[in-house]
Amino acid sequence: MSYSGMAATAAQMKELDRIAIEERGIPSLELMEQAATAVADAVEDLLTPAPLGPTATSSTLLVAVPRKGESLTDEDQAEVERLQAMMNDPAQKGRRVAVFCGPGNNGGDGIAAARLLMQRGFSVRAVLVGERNRMTADARAMEQRLRDCGGTLEDFCPTNQEQMLLLSVCDCNVDALFGVGLSRPITGDAALAVQLLQTRTGSPVVSCDIPSGIHTDTGAVLGCAVRAAVTVTFSCPKPGHYLGDGAEHTGDLRVADIGLPFDLLYNQTARLEVVDGSFTLPRRKPNSHKGDYGRLLIVGGSEGYTGAPVLAASAALRSGAGLVFVAVPRNVYPIVAGRCSAAMPFPLPDSADALLDRVNGCSAALIGPGLGRDHDNLVRVLLQVLDCPVVLDADGLNAAVGHLNWIRSRTAPTVLTPHDGEFARLTGCTLPIGDRLDAARSLAQDTGAIVVLKGHRTVTAAPDGRTWINTSGNAGMATGGSGDTLAGILAAFLGQKPLYSNGTDAARLTAQAVWFHGAAGDHAARRLGEYSLLPDDLIDALPQVLRDHIAD
């Protein structure tokens, strides 16, 4: 059974396969057959009833082109006519598939898929990119099965014009060059094969498990990488399908069940999840009152940054917070007060004690949106005395640079929301962040806080090692104020006791709030487009997105 909510790293998948084969006694060729069937199904879906996208025409680039004043030789002309006949053959239209196989087990998946496609009536050319003496035992076994069916695994030869011509007129290509174990840049003939897949054929690519050249755990491009129309991954998604450049190279992701036992899959992958919106929010009880849904304190705002706490407060109220208090510096209080209707703003008192008296009994707090750097001591005191969940955002994070002990000493949940630059300041790491999963986990374990590492495919990490990859959101959200809306949603969720149900704790609730933020952005982008998206549009979209996820 496959479960798309789980995800697995390269090391986890290697161990899963080992246990399944060596300890559970599942034949490796049986797993490979199941994987190949899923790949063949994806190819057939793309080519039925007609190929997606144009049939390759760039093959003419591979035919000898005469210089000015010269004409094609008889041999070249015959080659062109043969190619034209192949392209116009109605019996082959939309039925030609090229399968690029590496010598490893990912290549074995491709070889098996080539055989299955042949048996379904497709015209298939399977090529081995790599040395035959490096083929795994399973890949060799699949080659023998291909031979038994009348097929051939030919060696990849970029200088062979006939082979290049035949490959370039295929209607679909299968990328089975490298699997999840790749950790070094692609070079040599493999790089040429990737280039051919991307620039010469113009036909859609189906990748086996992960696009070749994409790092399984980080999504980084290792030298060069295939850009797939469809990626068929086995048993569960991998981080590289979502993170870094991998998100753009993966295309349509399909998760295929290849026969791994569910209990084995769950036990190995339960600590890494993909948040895809497959959860619900509890219905509110009819006899509810505003106190049931949290008293939220927001501390923020400064001259030039009065919009940040207002956006956070609006997002919190739209996310269900019962009462929202907004404490801002006295010099900007009139501006903030004029923009708040449902939230309750007030000037920051002269002391932290006076502030706490004002909001005694708050169920969650958000510290930092637009606060400026004049209140670092206030941030320290609040972190020490507040016994409720605290979201530390923006200048709240800046105040904690060099003072992570303020966070470590807290007993109530703390959520840190850094973007990459803030993360670098907090931890001293260099940019860019290579492994976002590992980075978020490390900071969470070091501080005891829940870390929301913002960016494309935001990563949420809990101190106990559990990690979530978010799948919602779009480029239109890359605008000032989006982070303030996220902070408001996070604080609102953490302050509502009814949301802590069915095993949902602060860390999981945080990951869900991140998803809702992105989903609101997606909803708004569908209506307005990405270029015109504003934080207010996200807030306006929240009611619909939340309503769609209320339990029946």
Image (tube, rainbow, N blue to C red):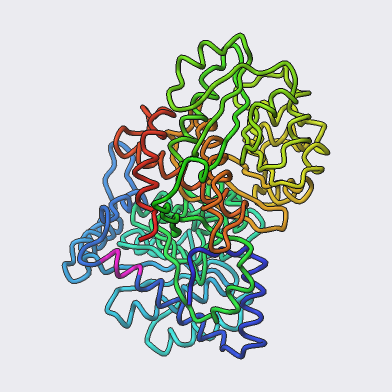
Q: Is residue 187 left or right of residue 118?
A: right
Answer with left or right where residue 550 lies relative to residue 436: left
In which quarter of the view is residue 179 placed? bottom right
Residue 315 shown in magenta: no
In the image, 278 versus 179, the foreground residue is 278
Q: Which residue sits furthest top? A: 331
Query: In the depicted view, which residue is nearer to us: 480 or 73?
Result: 480
- Residue 339, image x and y in percent? 45, 18
Position of 8 relative to 373 (above/below): below
| 136 relative to 159 in the view: left or right | right
Q: Where is residue 405 in the image (x, y as percent from the top left)?
A: 83, 38
Q: Which of 417 and 321 is in front in this view?
A: 321
Position of 523 compared to 84: left or right? right
Principal secondary structure, stretch drawn in magenta: helix
Q: Position of residue 411 (x, y in %)?
A: 76, 47
* Image position, residue 277 (x, y; %): 44, 55
Q: Per the image, is 43 magenta? A: yes
| Boundaries of the magenta span | 42-47
Q: Which quadrant is home to the C terminus?
A: bottom left
